[in-house]
Image (spheres, grey):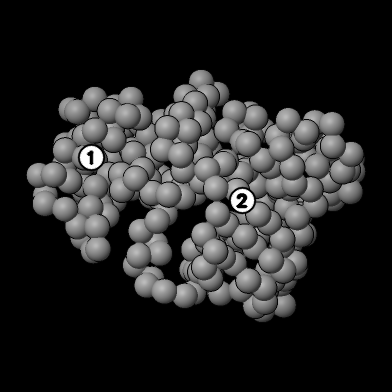
Amino acid sequence: MITLTGVQKSFGPKTVLRHVDLTVPRGTSMVIIGGSGTGKSVTLKCILGLVEPDAGTITVDGSDVHEGDRDAFLARFGMLFQGGALFDSLPVWQNVAFRLLRGALKRPRAEAREIAIEKLRRVGLTPDVADAFPAELSGGMQKRVGLARAIAADPEIIFFDEPTTGLDPIMAGVINDLIREIVTEMGATAMTITHDMSSVRAIADHVAMLHDGVIKWTGPVAQMDAAEDPYLQQFIHGRAEGPIAAVR
């Protein structure tokens, strides 16, 4: 579904992606792990066309990401942002139905509200939450609203940016379970970036280790623990000693 070949990206003198090769099979869940500043978020932005790579090619479903109708391309994606990224001035249902109230996916207002309430139910939130404002919700509830918005238009591809950041272990487990269930039910292709190894084990079919702008290791999550790559082993076990230098 998604293929990156030789993708490179620099910002001024700082090289973020050196030569990224990655394939995400259709209908599977790929999790990208790696330290802060290794280029995980930039990789997602390049796929979405928000950042232009300096070299390399990126295709989605066989087509270059820069070809064809831009709105139709973006309509295939859903996104759960790290900080929730909810609009404070809009009630919850309008946050969830944001794409359904405007643009190419526009639906009648009453229909958009019904869809929003159904998606809220899917992530374990009751209809009375629909008219609340984000500031009235806990962090875990806000994350669920963000997840409901990500799936509101039934996207083919969903990106999850640090989905459990800022959540307690129990709520993180709830969010991981929801992501796994929703991706499986929808048959969507998923890409997640995270530091949380419990999330990796809960939601990944495949894992890619990104370090210094290069994919150091990629393979099925079941093979991750036995893999011999020293970068991967240092990261997944949180060891201070190893090829990844700690910033002091």
**Residue 122's image quarter?**
top left
Q: Looking at the image, is mark 2 or mark 1 earlier in the sequence?
A: 2
**Residue 14's image quarter?**
bottom right
Between 221 and 176, the one lying in front of the other is 221
Secondary structure type for disc 1 = helix
C-alpha gap between disc 2 and disc 1: 29 Å
At a point 28% along the width and 40% down the height, the residue shown is 134
Which residue does the numbered mark 1 point to in the structure image?
116
**Where in the figure is residue 182, as x and y percent of width and height?**
43, 33
**Where in the figure is residue 130, as x and y percent of width and height?**
20, 35
68 left or right of 24 in image: left
- Amino acid carrying mark 2 in the image: Val
Q: Is residue 83 visible?
A: no
- Amino acid carrying mark 1 in the image: Ala
On residue 24, which mark appears? 2
89 left or right of 1 in image: left
